[in-house]
Amino acid sequence: MFEPIEVKIEGGYDIELPTLVPVKQLFSTPKVDCINAAVAAEFAKKEISALIKPGEKIAVAVGSRGIANLKEIVLSTITNIKNLGAEPFIVPAMASHGGATAEGQVKLLAEYGVTAEAMGVPIASSMETVELGRTSSGVPVYFDKNASEADGVVIIARVKPHTDFKGPFESGLMKMLAIGLGKHKGATHIHSLGFDSFHTVIPEVGSEIIAKAKIKLGVAALENAYDETARIEAVPASNIYEREPGLLEEAKSYMGSIIPRNFDVLIIEEIGKDISGAGMDPNIVGRPGSKLEGFNGPEIQKLVVFDLTKKTKGNACGIGMADVTTRHLVNQIDFSYLYINSITSTVLDPAKIPVTMNTEKEALVIALKTCNRIAAKAAKIVFIKNTLELDYIYVSEPLLEELKAREDVQILGEPQEITFNEVGRLTLRPSLISI
């Protein structure tokens, strides 16, 4: 338990603060209205339906990310496989997540509504792998044992920008094959090679799995800036290498962003593994744990994080990218989950604990006091709920002038005083703006 600590600062914590204004960021993005219809339309395509044969036992690989409509996508995929006369079952494809245990991975799937009962098929969860061989560069290729024994494998994955590296294949179908289905053993080995090698290692390992395992197809989900399913596409295994880079570029075009690009303090209400694999998406905030280039976040001086999501179960991965946080957050951390995640990735900075203050009030004041060349009252502040929900946000009044002329920002109300309750919690919340 992180105990209270008294930190005296010049002038104290009762300082003059700027007012905050509620705004809505507007993003133009597509949306799938009916998941069942979208998945059925993909499986109705001749090049897809021809891949599934009656009587085949098909492993459906499902990952650990909080994909929008995951339960519906998985159920619809299973239903369509059954309609083709095959016998599907689920395998968790989540590397070392869920505490790197078979039971933990089943439990993690259940939190997304993916259970044997709800899906109507068994779940075969194991951390056991088989080695399919080695890539041309000598990388061993590990693959889920249960999936290797099936007549075919269908993978379900969200295609999106990765949080630690850039390349033609980032988060998506190839990564699900190489790391998700590589389980803890495969994920640990690939991560040991470093994120700076991922842009070549992932397609190498993924291609080797496609060549040697019975991969049928991938169901790719793309999401829009409002954390909704933008599009679903089924890709034959033989076409994943050629098709996925195009899907990644499409996914990037749908992403939200923090529209102000230069300000002093970014406040994030919550981070969590259900928000991003990195807790807070470096594609939004511009701070990757890997320190690799290609992440174009806003120019800021300080980043403050107040809380963890409930669904992250104490995994505070990404907190190390913040400058200031709260005792409330630190006292929720499950260090076992946090450390196994960071150790597996070989990137330890995201697990480090930043300057920890007793309350949100103290955290904000310290962030402002440690900014250079600005007075607190004139500080440019952006306050977001998390890096997934970027439509309703607060900005401080000094930012208003540059936003008023923009067509993609709507001013929703008058400036509001920054106030705190009796335990130092900020009373304004981005999640309450739309209520």
Image (cartoon, rainbow, N blue to C red):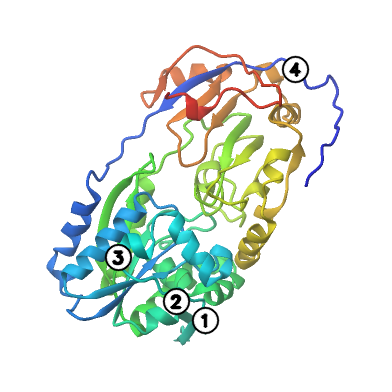
Q: Mark on residue 15? A: 4
Q: Mark on residue 205? A: 2
Mark 3 or mark 2: whose residue is earlier in sequence: 3
Q: Name the residue nearer the viewer: 168 or 410.
A: 410
Amino acid on which the number 3 mark rests in the picture: Gly
Q: Position of residue 425 (x, y in %)?
A: 66, 27
Q: Name the residue nearer the viewer: 336 or 213.
A: 336
3 vs 2, front mark: 3
Q: Position of residue 94 (x, y in %)?
A: 48, 66
Q: Spatial distance from mark 1 to mark 3, Cα to Cα?
A: 37 Å
Question: Judging from the image, what secondary structure is the residue with disc 2 in?
Answer: helix
Contact (CB < 8 A) between labels 1 and 2?
yes
Contact (CB < 8 A) between labels 3 and 4?
no
Q: Spatial distance from mark 1 to mark 2, Cα to Cα?
A: 7 Å
Q: Label 2: how many residues lie within 10 Å, few (<14), some (14-19) or many (20+)?
A: many
Q: Label 3: how many residues lie within 10 Å, few (<14), some (14-19) or many (20+)?
A: some
Q: Mark on residue 139? A: 1
Q: Position of residue 328 (x, y in %)?
A: 69, 39
- Residue 326 visible in the current orientation: no
Question: Judging from the image, what secondary structure is the residue with disc 3 in?
Answer: loop
Mark 1 or mark 2: whose residue is earlier in sequence: 1
Amino acid on which the number 1 mark rests in the picture: Val
Q: Spatial distance from mark 4 to mark 2, Cα to Cα?
A: 55 Å
Question: Judging from the image, what secondary structure is the residue with disc 1 in?
Answer: loop
| Residue named by callout 3 | 120
Mark 1 or mark 3: whose residue is earlier in sequence: 3
